[in-house]
Image (tube, helix red, strand yellow):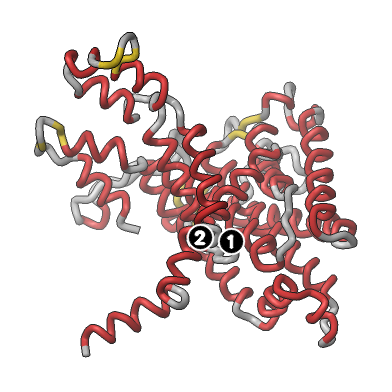
Amino acid sequence: MLYPFIYGFLTSISLSLLGVSLGELFTVFLPRVRTMVVVLYVGLFAMSFDFVSGYTGYLSFGHAMFYGIGAYFVVLVGTGKIPGLPAETPFMLIIVLAGLLAFLAALAVGAVSFRLTGVYFAMVTLGFAEVAHVFIRNWSYVGSNPRDGVGVVGRDGFAVGIPGIDALQFRLGRLAGDSFENVLGTGIDLGAAEVSFYAVGAVVLVCYFAMQRIIHSPFGRVMVAIRENEERAEAVGYNTFWYKLGAFGISGFFAAIGGALFAGYRRSVAPENTFDLFVTADALLAAIIGGFGTLAGALYGHLFHEFLQGIFTTESSGLARFLRDTLSEGILSAGVGDFTVLEFINVFIDGRAELYLGVVFVAFVLFVPRGILGSLRDRLGGPLAETIPERLRRYRR
């Protein structure tokens, strides 16, 4: 939670090493604070995907539908298009209602999909999501041009906090978000990105602990039993259909909260960034890189994704722009024939995040199938929260 301060300190360092400014170097390799806000709400969506796919073994390729339900519900309430819910409805109430709506949708989809297993289950959930995607692209009720999406205009920023107490509510967003100067007399200023980071982070943390609690409950142990051997779980008396359906509904609930945070922060949604298949693919990618069946690993997996995108971006904070500005003309023009260092930077670094992300994905599937967090747990012999304190106690003796 100290990341905004660490980022601000490191990127403000004015020292140089071998003619390279350390502050500018950290700007290239560290995600910006507003990028970390994205990591949090997309990470929550990826954790909800891992909750059902990683712990029951059923891959939900249509999970973006629940993320989209949460996002669109927020925008529709914010524009006053949901009967009975005025545009100024407290955001905390909106995200809970969005989660409940997605929970019911997940039960309806799961009631049909869990009649099947394996790839057939994945394809059926994908089919439902595509139906929802096409529907939202052509539903003129959401806006004049539903294919391009819709935004919230006219209401204040969506606030995370305790409804009814203005002092304990913090508005989200790059433009509509709150900012504070000299917080509690400490001399610390918090901009809109920092306030959004802590507000979204608080919601994500509560959701994470709630999912962890469920996983470590008797219900969660049945989920793991289904993943390991569903026939054996049925043989000892569990009605696995209802457990899978319950897990799917809970997963949809948290996916919708991730989508609601996205819409609350961005104040606009579009079919391509909510209901699209590639939104589910991002969650799958994060879960595989972070570690399937680890829950928190999905968040770290998406952090890794954003880390790569930040380095290989075409923006001014990217590695390509940094190298072009830092390297001398002689180095940039050196090379073999017409293929110079500058050409290498332009072809293989500038805006090539997706290229390397694909390579990393293949490498993880082949060589690190347990992902980052799963591999760490295997090496340390258990969850980090248990093994690291034990090892520290061992070194003190």
Residue found 28% across the figure and 86% down from its top: 394
Tell me the residue that label 1 is attached to: 292
Q: Find residue 320 and report its horizontal and vertical position in percent.
A: 33, 25
Q: Find residue 6 and report its horizontal and vertical position in percent.
A: 25, 51
Residue found 45% across the figure and 28% down from its top: 352
Q: Residue furthest front?
A: 336
Tell me the residue that label 2 is attached to: 297
Q: Nearer the viewer, residue 191 or 342?
A: 342
- Can residue 164 be seen in this snapshot? no
Decide: marks 1, 2 in contact (CB < 8 A)? Answer: yes
Q: Quadrant of the N terminus?
A: bottom left
Q: Amino acid at mark 2?
A: Gly
Label 1 environment density (alpha carbons within 10 Å; few <14, some 14–19, many ≥20): many
Q: Is residue 139 above or below residue 223?
A: above
Q: Quadrant of the C terminus?
A: bottom left
Q: Find residue 363 and report its horizontal and vertical position in percent.
A: 51, 47
Q: Find residue 78 and report its horizontal and vertical position in percent.
A: 64, 40
What distance separates the C-alpha of mark 1 from that of mark 2? 7 Å
Q: Residue furthest bottom?
A: 397
Q: Is residue 11 above or below residue 212?
A: above
Q: Nearer the viewer, residue 238 or 48?
A: 238
In the picture provided, is 325 more to the left or to the right than 95?
left
